[in-house]
Amino acid sequence: MPDLLSHAFIGYILCTVLALRYEWLTPAYVTVGMAGALIPDMAKISLAIDGSLVGAFIDLPFSWFGIHTLGGATVAVLIGVLLVAVEERRRVLVLLSIGAGSHLFADALLFKVTGFSYPVFWPLTMYRPPTPGLYHSTNIWPSLLLASVAAVTWYVVRKRPHSA
Amino acid sequence: MMVSSRTGRLVGVLFLLVVLGGLCVGFGVENSVVDGSPVPNADDLAYDYTGHIGQAVHVGGPVVETDPVVIETEYEYYADGEQHAGILRLTIHDVSTPVEKGHVLRTYAVVQPNTELVARNELVIPQWHYWYMYVVSAIAGFWVLARLIRGWTIDIEELALIRRNTSDSPGGGS
C-alpha cells in the first residue's frame, strides 16, 4: 500500500466490518487492529538510524527490514500481546495479526521496477513473489479510495444502527 | 505458562526484542553486500561496481541532469567492520519516461562501465509525492496514537495496557 494512512484505513475497515459479526469488537479493539496494520512499517526506523550504522556498532550485518517480513511482524505482534493485560491477549493477538497481515499483503502488491515484491515470507524463504504492481508507495488515489470506504464502513456499522 | 506477572512481562518483552534483533541480523546477512544481495542495489554497486557489470540492479534517486539522465543515489552498507556511506552519480540511458530535475527516478537497469546503466524498466515520481507520503503517514501515526490513548490506559502496578471501559461500547464511537 502507499502510505501509512492507507494501512491504517485497511485495519479500520477490516476490524469494523468484523464488528458486525463480533459484538465485543468495540472501537478500542478496532484501534488494536489499526495499530497492527502499522507494525511492519516499524522498519522505517531506518530513516532515522540506518541499519548499516547498527551493523557497524554490533559488528554484524543488520537490516531493519527484517521487521517487515512474516517472521519480524510475528515477533512484533507477540510483543504487543505481552504488553496488554492477560484477559485481553487472545483478542489482541487476533486483531494485531489481522492488521499486520493486511499490511504485509498490501505491500506485496506494490509496483516494483524489478517486477518482484519483497521476501514477505522470510525467514521461511527468501522467495520474492511476482507483484501485480497495482500501485506505488507514493500514489495518492489509494488513500483517497480507502478513506471513502472507511467512511462508508463507519456509517454502516457504527452510525446507522443507532440513528434509526 | 502464562506470562502474567510484571517481571515475567518485562522478561518476555526483552526476550522477544532480542529475537527481533536476531531476525534483523539474519535479514542483514541474507542481503549483505559482501556476499551479494539477491536483488543488487546501490549499496552493492558502491561495494563492488565492476563485479556487477552486465548484471541488472535496481537503483533510484533524484534526477540531477536530464541530458543524459543522471541520478544521485545514496548508499549505506556495513562491510569490513565499518559503515560505508555516500552518494553515487549514475548515468541512466534508455529512459523512456520524460523526466525533470528533482523528479525521483527508480529503475531496473543493466550495469555498464563508467557508472552508466541501461534502463530496462523505470518509474518516475515527482518529489512532492514523497512529502505527501510523509505527511499522511505522520497523520496516520497520530490518529492511531490518539485512538489508543482514548481507548486504552496503563495499569501501573502490572505495567500492562487495559481498556478504558467507560468510553467503549459496541454501538458507540468509531
Image: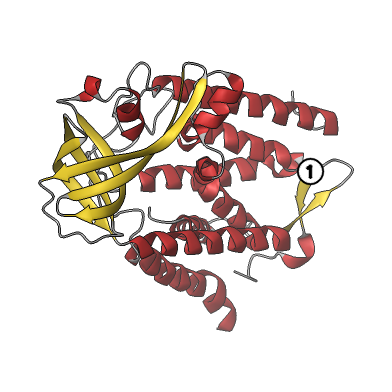
Q: Is residue A146 left or right of residue A163?
A: left
Asked if residue A25 shows in the view, the reply is no
Q: Tag 1: residue type?
A: Ala
Residue A98 lies left or right of residue A109; in this view the side is right
Q: Position of residue B154 (x, y in %)?
A: 80, 50
Point 63% across, 45% down: residue: A91
**Nearest to the observer: residue A116 or residue B32:** B32
Q: Residue furthest right?
A: B157
**Chain for numbered disc 1:** B
- Residue A39: x %, y % from top left: 54, 44
Furthest residue to the bottom? A164
Which of the 4 image quadrants contains residue B171? bottom right
Quarter of the picture holding the C terminus of chain A: bottom right
Q: Position of residue A111 (x, y in %)?
A: 27, 48
Residue at the spot of label 1: B160
Judge by depth and name the residue closer to the eye, A152 or A6: A6
